[in-house]
Amino acid sequence: MQRMVMVGLLAWVLPGLGHLYLRQQARGMILLVMVALTFWTGVAVGGVRSTVDPKQRTLWFMAQISAGSHTLATLALREIAADPQPGPTQAGAWLSTDVGIHYTGVAGLLNVLVILDALLRCDPTIRRDVVADYEHGGTG
């Protein structure tokens, strides 16, 4: 049980790290790069100040926080880059912000799948039970 908690926590903190802990280096590196690339592409498109906003976009933030340290780093960067006197925004900025929000939200939701995959790989008995349940039509 302690191992599962450790794997789940590592997979949340840095997507792919749970798989690396389980000595699945290739899978872990692919997941690490892909979730990070998706998340930071969203931040690059939408901007640090407007992409991750827990107060204005609470539901999106709930998806984004699943990306763990990426979201926490973006929140820290957002505070550093805060504009002391916000001015008018550019006319097309809202579209790029929306795209950035969607990318970062999708990266967070992908990491939920990464966490679940790491947990299933951590304990083979759980995986066998899930597969057996699926093969029997979910009648459990």
Image: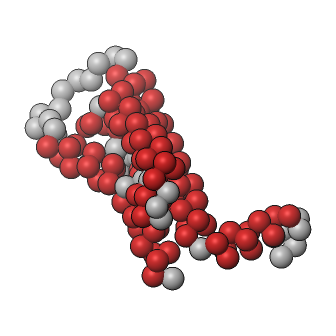
Residue 127 in percent (x, y) is at 68, 69
Can residue 66 be seen in this snapshot?
no
Judge from the rendering whether residue 89 lies leftward or rightward of residue 84; answer left or right: right
Question: What color scheme is it?
Answer: secondary structure
Which residue is painted at 49% across and 48% down in the image? Answer: 26
Question: Which quarter shows the C terminus?
Answer: bottom right
Judge from the rendering whether residue 125 lies leftward or rightward of residue 29; answer left or right: right
Residue 2 in percent (x, y) is at 45, 82
Q: Is residue 101 above or below residue 62?
A: above
Residue 129 in percent (x, y) is at 74, 74
Which residue is painted at 81% across and 64% down in the image? Answer: 134
Q: Looking at this view, is 102 or 14 the one in front?
A: 14
Q: In this view, does 138 lie above or below 94?
A: below
Q: Looking at this view, is 92 or 5 the one in front?
A: 5
In the displayed orientation, state which residue is furthest to the bottom. 1
Q: In this view, does 44 lie above or below 57?
A: above
Which residue is painted at 81% across and 70% down in the image? Answer: 133
